[in-house]
Amino acid sequence: MHDNSALVWARIARFVSERLTPALYRESAPLAVDAWEVKDEPVPFAEAVGQQFEPVAIGTRWGAPWGTTWFHLTGTVPASWAAHTAAGFDGRVEVVVDLGFLSGLPGFQAEGLVFAPDGRIIKAIEPFNNHVPVAVGPGGSIDLYVEAASNPDVGSDWSCKPTPLGDKATAGTEAIYALRRMDVALLDQVVWELTQDIWTLTGLMDELSADLPRKAEILRALEAVVDRMDPQDVTGTAGAARDLLARIEAVDGKLRAEIVYDDRGRPTDERELDASGKVVRDAEFSEDGSRKAFGT
């Protein structure tokens, strides 16, 4: 039998990067950004907020190697976003910060620490974790400080070549980062949860032995998700995609699941089998893809 699993996985990964990830935020709006560069070693919050901050624009270069720059983010959540809530949209307001991250690594480069105006630490900012939850709704005010460290990227190529960036005395003073994004954004909760489902299942699939049926079942379920979703309406079809994956996620790891799909990607039959191959439970699906009750 022809094995097209590598092609299917590439299709799934492409769908996540090109369709799901860009659809995480339904709306976004830029924040006003002011900055103050620390001349030497980092300073406490109380000292930093009393300094003279200057306006900066997205694209501005900042941060000498091993330096510290404070950013002050202010703005208002657009009042027009209330229409989404009124329409039943499942979302939450966040601030999204991209300091100009350089590589696909979770660290070993720029990073930040976010403060409330009263000095309370809210959370850290890193390449894979660059959102800040804010407890305000449409029309509410945003006021945050970010202590950003311009650590140089000295390890992304995994080499041991000599570099002047390892010491402040030889690293130079030229700015090595450029601000990429400082926005208030409206997260699509359902799309975000779908990305977590896919991330979890692909992680499980990577750990399973190639001879286990569950590995293939997960792959085909993820393929069915891509088939089911409308790339032009990710928000509108993400819920149905999550329903498909819920069936896979709910299967006991000690059991083997078999789900049969028709040529339109709709499930038609589902069986759970024990280690001996005996059918433990069996279910059929309605025309709309919803599962009927399991039988025994």
Image (spheres, rainbow, N blue to C red):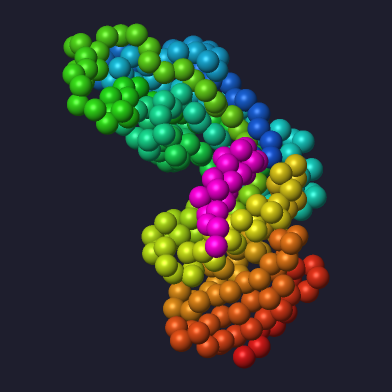
Predominant SS of the magenta segment:
helix
Q: Residue at 41% across / 34% down in the picture? A: 104
Residue 225, image x, y percentages = 65, 56
Question: In which quadrant of the rendered image does the N terminus lie?
Answer: bottom right
Can residue 51 be seen here? no
Q: Is residue 29 left or right of residue 155?
A: right
Where is residue 96, by image quadrant? Answer: top right
Q: Nearer the viewer, residue 188 or 22?
A: 22
Where is residue 78, by image quadrant? Answer: top right
Residue 133, image x, y percentages = 53, 43
**Quick check: 243 above or below 186?**
below
Q: Nearer the viewer, residue 216 or 254?
A: 216
Which stretch did the figure color magenta?
1-23
Q: Residue at 61% across / 56% down in the picture? A: 223
| In magenta stretch: residue 7 | yes
Question: In which quadrant of the rendered image does the C terminus lie?
Answer: bottom right
Question: Among all residues in the image, which is located at the extreme front?
Answer: 1
| In magenta stretch: residue 236 | no
Residue 275, image x, y percentages = 45, 83
Residue 286, image x, y percentages = 78, 74
Can residue 153 be seen here? yes
Q: Residue at 41% across / 22% down in the picture? A: 70
**Quick check: 41 above or below 239?**
above
Q: Residue at 56% across / 87% down in the picture? A: 280
**Quick check: 254 above or below 156?**
below
**Quick check: 9 above or below 176?**
below
Q: Is residue 172 left or right of residue 96?
A: left
Tally of marks = 0
Question: Among all residues in the image, which is located at the extreme bottom?
Answer: 296
